Amino acid sequence: MKRLMMSLMCLTFLFSFFMVYGQNNSLKINAGNARGRADQRIDFLKKLYIFQVYQDAEYSLRKNTPDDEYFIGIGYNKQLIKRLSLGVDLNYSCLIQDLRLPVNKLGYFNSLGDVFAWRDISKYHLIQVIPSIRVHIISNKFRLGADFSSLGNVSFLKHIEPYNLKASRIEYFSTELYPGIFMGYNRFNLNIGVRAWHWKYRDDAIANNGLKVDPYNPFKMRLSLSYDIYKW
């Protein structure tokens, strides 16, 4: 009997916490920035190139800056119950990297001239599909809660500088998972997440470690600001 009463109390609490709220839909625009530690594993260069190439790449690590990503897009949110909502975003993103690595100039970019070239700066243009789930701790005009997002990144243009090498190919780039927090007031929302899981697919535009899928996950933080342009 005691267990039954405890179970009923738990169910009552859960029902009151996730009490039915009715439909609440919103269409939003969003923009933001993500910064993360570059993947500085370059030991694989010893097997692919002469040792001088590895030494030059190792020396350049001192000048390396964090990976920088800028994005903008639209999204849709649906409030399922008072404490739970689902959403999906569609973003355009530009990922900027400056870790110095050899470029697959002839094999990937079909560029003639010198076979060997360094990647000083690359700009990867991506489309992101981002489903998310939110648990609302505070749910009224001011909102606060936990957010869990999954990012699927598809690249459609890779641009290597300073050689102006460009390749337009549709390739699956990576999958990322971000737990985080969100806060909002009226129509504005701020989301902050830290990457917890990362599957990076092989990038044949530059020298790589040969792994088709690489689960390495250097630190990365993502910040997004959105505005609800229409609610119904």
Image: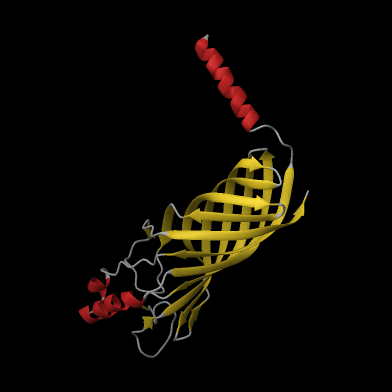
Query: Visible in this render: residue 170?
Result: no
State whether residue 11 is above or below residue 149: above
Please name whichever residue, 75 or 10, is drawn nearer the observer in this view of the structure: 10
| Left or right relative to 231: residue 93 | left
| Left or right relative to 76: residue 205 | left
State whether residue 173 is above or below residue 187: below
The single residue placed furthest to the bottom in the displayed view is 113
Please name whichever residue, 41 or 46, is drawn nearer the observer in this view of the structure: 41
The single residue placed furthest to the left in the displayed view is 51
Q: Residue at x 34, y 73 (%)?
A: 207
| Left or right relative to 136: residue 151 | left
Q: Position of residue 18 (x, y in %)?
A: 63, 33
The single residue placed furthest to the top in the displayed view is 1
State whether residue 89 is above or below residue 123: above
Q: Residue at x 52, y 57 (%)?
A: 152
Q: Residue at x 73, y 47 (%)?
A: 25
- Quadrant of the rendered structure where residue 45 is? bottom left
Query: Visible in this render: residue 121?
Result: yes
